[in-house]
Image (cartoon, rainbow, N blue to C red):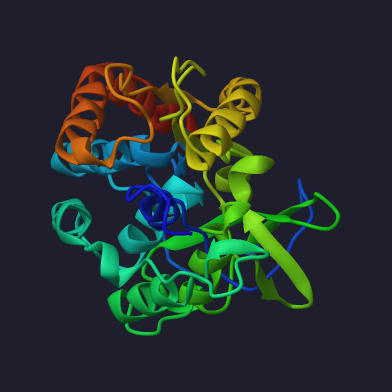
Amino acid sequence: MSGLPRRAWLRGVVGGAVALAQAPAGAALPRSPHRVASQRLRLGLALGSGSASGFAHIGVLKSLVQAGIKPDFVAGSSAGALVGALYAAGYSPFRIEDVALHVRDVEVADFASAGKRGMLLGDSLHRLVGDAVRGATIETLPIGYAAVTTDLRSGERVVLSAGSVADAVRASCSIPGVFVPREIGGRELVDGGLVSPLPVSTARALGGEFVIAVDVGTKPYRTSMPGLYEVLLQSFEIMGHALSQQEAAQADLVIRPDTSAWASSDFSVRREMIQAGYEAAQRALPELKRRLDAGSARSRPT
C-alpha cells in the first residue's frame, strides 16, 4: 500500500456522487421544487467523469456564471459529481476552485489496514464533503441535483437524488480497487463512470429542457503505465470513451475542454485543467446563447 502513487487519492476526490434515492436507468426523477422563470428553458448541466481532467468542470462553471448562465439542475458522474454537488450546495465556481487548489492529501487519504477491497477507506473523504456542505441532504440543496453510481453486484446504474450528500459523494468516489465500495440501501455502490460517464439522461430526467454536457474525458492513450493506478485509469478511459460518445448525442450542446496536453492522472496541473475548461466554455458561449435564445422563443406562448 505504501506504493500507491501520491496522486491516486485525488482521483476519488474529483470523482464524486450523491444521495440515497435509487432509480433505474431511464426512470424519471423527482422534479426539483425550485421554481424556474417561465420565460426561459430550464437548463440542465451534465458533468462527466474524467479523473484529474475533472478540474476543467470548475473552469466551465466560471465561464457560464460570468455570462449569466446559471443551471437549474446539475447531474454529475464521478469527477463531475463532486464539483456538481458543491455548486448545487451554493458554492460559487471561484470558491470551488479555491477548495480544489488547496485540499491536502491528509484530508482524504485514509489507507485501509486490510486492503482486500480497496486501498482507501473513504471515511476522510466523507468527512471532508460533509463539512463542506454542513451535513446537507440533496433535498435541501438550492439547486436540483443528482449523481450516478454503479451497483457493484448487478452492474446497474443507480441514480442518487436524495439523502446525505456526503454519503453519496463517498459512494460515487469508490473507484474499484482504490476505494472500498460504499453500501447504501443494501447495495454496494462504486464509480458512476463505469456505466454513465456523461449523465445527460439524468440531467434531462431532473427537469432540464436544454442540457449542456461537459465531456472532460480524453481519448485513451498513454505510453507508460508504471503502477496499478495508471492501469485502472487506462481501463476506465477505454470503457468510458465509447459510452461518453453515445451519451453526448443526447445533449443539446457539448463542451469538450482540451486537456490532451496533460495526463488525466496528473494532479499537479489543476490550474491548467481549470483554465482549459474556462476557455472551452468561452468558445462555446456564442452558440450556446444563440440556441438558448431560440429555444426560449419557441417555448413562449403565442
Front in this rendered view, residue 249 or 109: 109
Query: Does 119 sit left or right of 195 as displayed?
Result: left
Q: Which residue is drawn at 56% across and 24% down?
A: 248
Measured as percent of width and height from the top left, residue 105 is found at 27, 62
Q: Where is residue 141 in the image (x, y as percent from the top left)?
A: 40, 72
Q: Position of residue 36 (x, y in %)?
A: 40, 56
Pick the residue in front: 289 or 81.
81
User: Residue at (44%, 78%) from the top-left corner?
Assistant: 140
Residue occupying image coordinates x 59% and y 34%: 236
Vertically, is 165 above or below 257?
Answer: below
Where is 293 relative to 125, above or below?
above
Q: Is residue 295 visible?
A: yes
Instruction: Name, please, the residue furthest toward the front.
Output: 2
Up the image or down, 213 lies above or below 27; here it is above
Q: Is residue 302 visible to us here?
A: no
Residue 273: which quarter of the image? top left
Residue most toward the right? 154
- Residue 30's quadrant in the figure? bottom right
Task: Please state the horizontal and vertical placement of residue 196, each as a whole percent of the image.
Answer: 64, 40
Image check: 197 left or right of 154?
Answer: left
Residue at the image position 26 percent from the left and 43 percent from the top: 61
Please give the count of numbered marks on the rendered protein: 0
Left or right, residue 192 beside residue 76 = right
Query: What is the residue that sits farthest to the bottom in this orientation?
Result: 135
Is residue 20 or residue 108 the one in the foreground? 108
